[in-house]
């Protein structure tokens, strides 16, 4: 990719960001690989509060992404893998953008910033967990140079989940 990546800013999610995440992710296309349906505001209130705790304890979290006009466009960052199946004990990187912000390099730009911050925090290795059909997300792992390491049976959506890894 030779184009300059777009400008993106990352911040620890605020209370208000829960409302913004709820609004921009209220879209079946965005949620296709997350159960297909919009989630309640309470889900994002819990998720953003949890990210603030991760930031306080570890110095990283799933950050709110802002474009150069300071609009909330999604989240990208890292957190301890939150499920009781899969890569328990690992640090997971993840990304989710409002539909109108796809196809502009924002997720890749934010993921590269995340990797730099993780290196600075002393994290040695990260995983990404992506359902097998999620080609756009798999393309992001490819742009980051991640390698397919493992395949799990995802218990909730009954699909294969790919585990990608990058050593930092
Ligand atoms: C997964 C997701 C974040 C990927 O977003 P994305 O915008 O496709 O990813 P990137 O930021 O890497 O952008 C790459 C695209 O931007 C294009 N692009 C345009 N301008 C660009 C620029 N200046 N620099 C880089 N890429 C640019 C690339 O060509 C590429 O387009 P293509 O996919 O049509 O080839 C997005 O599809 C999403 O939010 N999906 C729903 C949530 C989800 O499934 N999350 C992942 C769960 S594992």
Image (tube, rainbow, N blue to C red):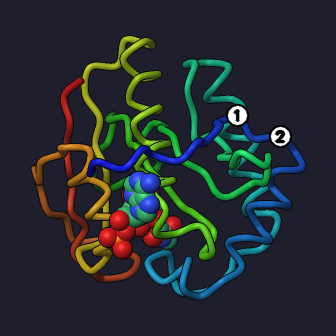
Which residue carries the number 2 mark?
14
Q: Which residue is drawn at the image coordinates 21% and 74% (left, top)? A: 160
**Above/below status of 61 relative to 71:** above
Q: CA distance from mark 2 to mark 1?
A: 8 Å
Mark 2 is surrounded, within 10 Å at the Cα level, by few (under 14), some (14 to 19) or many (20 or more) other residues, namely: some
Q: Which residue is drawn at the image coordinates 68% and 49% (left, top)? A: 67
Which residue carries the number 1 mark?
11
Of the pair 58 and 67, the residue shown nearer to us: 67
* Quadrant of the drawing holding the C terminus: top left
Residue 92 seen in the current view: yes
Q: Is residue 47 left or right of residue 163?
A: right
Find numbered disc 2 in the image and state the secondary structure of the residue it sits on.
loop
Mark 1 is surrounded, within 10 Å at the Cα level, by few (under 14), some (14 to 19) or many (20 or more) other residues, namely: some
Of the pair 153 and 67, the residue shown nearer to us: 67
Of the pair 93 and 111, the residue shown nearer to us: 111
Of the pair 15 and 82, the residue shown nearer to us: 15
**How far across and how far down the image is residue 5, in percent?**
45, 45
Q: Which residue is drawn at the image coordinates 83% and 40% (left, top)? A: 14
Ligand 1 shown in quarter: bottom left
Residue 83 seen in the current view: no
Q: Which mark is residue 100?
A: none
């Amino acid at each position: 990719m030779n184009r300059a990546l777009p400008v993106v800013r990352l911040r620890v999610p605020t209370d208000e960001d829960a409302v913004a995440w709820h609004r921009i992710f209220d879209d079946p296309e965005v949620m296709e690989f997350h159960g297909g349906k919009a989630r309640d505001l309470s889900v994002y209130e819990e998720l953003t509060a949890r990210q603030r705790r991760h930031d306080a304890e570890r110095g990283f979290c799933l950050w709110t992404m802002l474009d150069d006009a300071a609009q909330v466009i999604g989240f990208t960052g890292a957190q301890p893998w939150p499920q009781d199946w899969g890569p328990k004990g690992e640090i997971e990187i993840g990304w989710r953008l409002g539909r109108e912000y796809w196809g502009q390099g924002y997720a890749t730009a934010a993921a590269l910033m995340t990797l730099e911050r993780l290196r600075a925090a002393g994290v040695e290795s990260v995983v990404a967990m992506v359902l097998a059909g999620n080609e756009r997300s798999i393309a992001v792992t490819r742009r980051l140079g991640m390698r397919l390491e493992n395949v799990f049976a995802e218990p909730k959506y009954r699909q294969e989940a790919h585990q990608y890894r990058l050593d930092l």
